[in-house]
Image (cartoon, grey):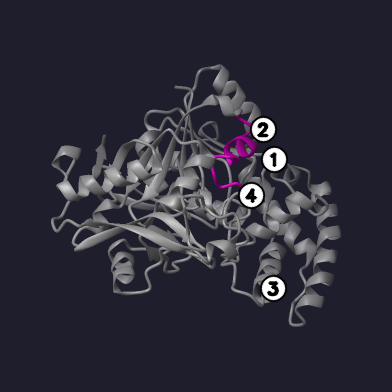
Amino acid sequence: MTATAVVGLQWGDEAKGKIVDLLTSEHDIVVRYQGGNNAGHTVKFDGQTYKLSLLPAGILRDGITSVVATGVVINPKAFLAELDGIVSRRGPVAPERFKVSDRAHVIFPYHLAEEAVLENSRQAEKIGTTMRGIGTCYREKAGRTHAIRIGDLLYPDLLRSRLHEIVAFKNQMLAALAPEFQPFDADAIFAEYLTYTERLKPYICDTTAFLHHAIADKKRLLFEGAQGSLLDLDHGTFPYVTSSSSSGCGIHSGSGVPERTISRMIGIVKAYTTRVGGGPFPTELNNEIGQHIRDVGHEYGTVTGRPRRCGWFDSVAAGYGARISGIDCLAVMLLDVLSGLEELKVCEAYEIDGERTTDFPSHVERLAQVQPVYRTLPGWKCEISHIRKVADLPANARRYVDTIAELLNSRVEIISVGPDREQTILG
């Protein structure tokens, strides 16, 4: 095994962090390849709960090297605050076991201001941005003219010159869009980011070269993404998506590691479906069952605290995520949340204009028109969080998991029945 990837197949929040944590001990390097501090993993480790946003889950383990790769966008202030939180609880993080890509792009205060103005000006349904400047930073990465990378922070004269040019433009633009806007001071931003650079400098390197050398040395890599496949910028429910390639398609562009290196792609799904922000959600439950799932599953954002929209498992949506990411097997998470419900429903197809299909629509207007076709299954009344073998699961719980495997045409290798590492069934 050269490399393993863990990819969410739904709209994110599939509990990928737990699986990354479980698999970390089998690997030498954990790589975060996309996203920013707009998403997070909750990991329970050594009896403590850690909420990670930018840092890979490998940061919690000795002997593991963690890499924040090229496809990530970094807010240095948030990044260092998260690192300080880990250091205060687990001790110093040595540069040899923590690498930050010099090609990763940097979030500045004007990115946050611009994103807020754009989101608030939207007349249609809000996209649901976290207002952390992620989208505007990725947009500048694509536009190139006003983009600044982590490696640029190491050249103060270059950084000062670029900031004066960029801030002058941003002040003019934002003043036109928002009359109450208070202009940014380029020199103040420069001074602030210079202090961040001093702390980041030991960790900054060419992570692409580092990973290529690691592969040549037969090191075992574990790739960890943020969000889920249905939020992928190119393949998700656009425009209600994130600003990066959050499906398995983004691993290679976000890390510089070639596709052939990945030997195992694990698709992560919740036993039900959630999403945050706007956009169509065919199986959404705006009733007491949806609220029950939200309460029992603690379905509130790791980073934002926002309540998540909850609904039945959607095999059309998750199956599409599985296909674009090319998964080899499944991990079904939070199965215990469904305990106690009289009956469960699984969406096995969509009906659009009177026709049945298992293809996921490419346009949100089309997705908004679908009617889910449900398969109804009996629930189970007993608690399952103590179970550690598939054979010990209630028959109806096994049937439910088997139905997900059937509809996604993949085998289930992992079942999670609680947040702790021990509350896991390996199939």
> How far apart in space, not on screen, are marks 2 and 1 (Cα)?
7 Å
Query: x and y percent of residue 400 in the render?
Result: 26, 49
Give neighbour class at mark 3: few <14, some 14-19, many 20+ (Cα, 10 Å). Answer: some
- What secondary structure is marked by label 2? loop
> How far apart in space, not on screen, are marks 4 and 1 (Cα)?
21 Å
Q: Are marks 2 and 3 in contact (CB under 8 Å)?
A: no
Identify the residue at image location x=54%, y=44%. 247
Q: Earlier in the sequence, mark 3 or mark 1?
A: 1
User: In the figure, is residue 23 to the left or right of 118?
Assistant: left
> How far apart in space, not on screen, are marks 2 and 3 (Cα)?
34 Å
- Residue marked by disc 2: 206
- Residue marked by disc 3: 117
Amino acid type, mark 2: Asp
Give neighbour class at mark 1: few <14, some 14-19, many 20+ (Cα, 10 Å). Answer: many
Amino acid type, mark 1: Arg
Circle 3 or circle 4, nearest the eye = 4
The one of 216 and 329 positioned closer to us in this rendering: 329
> How far apart in space, not on screen, are marks 3 and 1 (Cα)?
27 Å
Identify the residue at image location x=60%, y=30%. 257
- Tell me if residue 74 is in the magenta stretch: no
Please give the range of residues in magenta: 245-257
Regarding residue 205, the answer to whether it shows in the image is yes
Residue 234 sits above or below residue 301 on the image: above
- What secondary structure is marked by label 4? loop
Circle 3 or circle 1, nearest the eye = 3
Q: Earlier in the sequence, mark 2 or mark 3?
A: 3
- Residue marked by disc 4: 234
